[in-house]
Image (cartoon, rainbow, N blue to C red):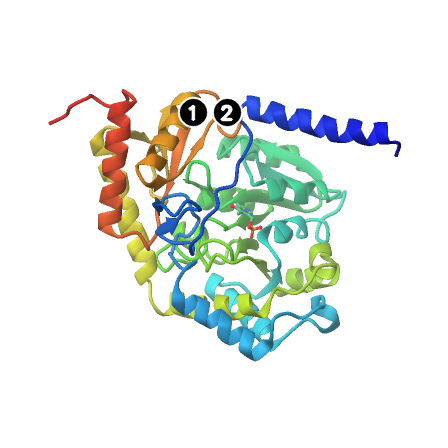
Amino acid sequence: MSDQAKSDFFNGLQQNLDQLREQGLYKPERVLSSRQGAEVVGQDGRKLINMCANNYLGLSGQEWVAQASIAATEKYGYGLSSVRFICGTQTVHKQLEQAISKFLGTEDTILYAAAFDANGGVFEPLFDENDAIISDALNHASIIDGIRLCKAARFRYAHNDMADLEAQLQAAAGKRHKLIVTDGVFSMDGTIAQLDKICDLADKYGALVMIDECHASGFMGATGRGTHEHHNVMGRIDIITGTLGKALGGAMGGFTSARKEVIDMLRQKSRPYLFSNTLAPSIAGASLAVLERLSASTELRDRLHENTAYFRKEIERIGFTIKPGTHPVVPVMLFDAPVAQKFAARMYELGVLLSGFFYPVVPMGQARVRVQLSAAHTREQLDTVLKAFEQAGRELGLLPTQAQ
Ligand SMILES: *Cc1c(COP(=O)(O)O)cnc(C)c1O
């Protein structure tokens, strides 16, 4: 490239970045100087109560999880320098795959470096131009990308709309295999997919069902198995993808879990598996310890749901509007984008870390701050957060100025 061509390229990037900033869409990174947890320390040394991590079970910063990862590193070393099929599979990887299958009630499981890779590599090996994939309109970006990499016909149904799902199943009638795919839980609203109805429609139209359990594995359902347990459809879901990077420990890593034929084929053909390095043994070992703990006791899951119920009840009592539901994702609706931004900034000053969302991330007029509960939050911390909500709400004129 000539010098001029190069500088055109870099200047163009800078202009686009400036534009993102002007539109309020530029995403700065928050730098923490502590472990992840209910309380974190910012770069400036300030302590903040963290209400925006996917740390649902509070395991990310837990000492026993860190120790399990250190023990696995001691035994299996730092890494494999190999993909799985050459010389990158250790006993700990096989044990973790078995443990995930047992936990989810499936036959077999394949590990990936991330759930993004699990979703990126699940469609193309299993479906081709003879088939149809029917996808919820608000599915995660990784599902959308994975479907793009596959030759199957694409059908999209309006978010969580069972009548439209049925219409799309009818539209896909001529296709050989049909797959319905949905997030088990949608992270923006905490909406739980209607898997009972989806499975009934799948049965009626001879379709397979796939769910992405990133915001469900470990805590949804009576024993935390996921949305399929919550909706009492364990055994009726054909493919489950999920992450090790949220409730199940929070490091990184993902998986696909399904019938053994499906997993066998993915091991042969799934590109993010074949052409990317093995999950670090430290993560595999710690994830195994986490699954053992979660299989032995529902204590963390129960505490999370108690915290969620308490926060949902109290935030409404104070006078805020939330999206109704039961999931630990609690969207506190502020409707107006600048208000949501100001609110999140004021909460930060008051020692509470949470994130504001506004158009185009959520629909116009639906601006909000999103709270995510954790089993690690103490009642005292939640009360501090609720007080801060009340104060910021009064100051910004969202609540009556004095309610005593
Ligand atoms: C977070 C998330 C992913 C990606 O998970 P990673 O393991 O971080 O790649 C995929 N799908 C959904 C629904 C998610 O929320």
Residue 102: x and y, percent? 49, 67
- Residue 366's label in the rendered image is 1
Q: Which residue is mark 2?
A: 359
Where residue 370 sits, quadrant-wise, is: top left
Instruction: Decide if residue 174 is in sight here.
Output: no
Amino acid at circle 2:
Tyr
Asked if the residues shown at circle 2 and circle 1 are in contact, with their CB atoms under 8 angstroms apart, the answer is: yes
Residue 390: x and y, percent? 24, 31
* Crowding near the residue tagged with mark 1, few <14, some 14–19, many ≥20 C-alpha atoms within 10 Å: many
* Rendered residue at 23%/50% (across/down): 379
Residue 37: x and y, percent? 38, 54
- Residue 315's label in the rendered image is none
Q: Is residue 39 left or right of residue 282?
A: left
Secondary-structure class at tag 1: loop
* Crowding near the residue tagged with mark 2, few <14, some 14–19, many ≥20 C-alpha atoms within 10 Å: some
Pick whichever of labels 2 and 1 is earlier in the sequence: 2
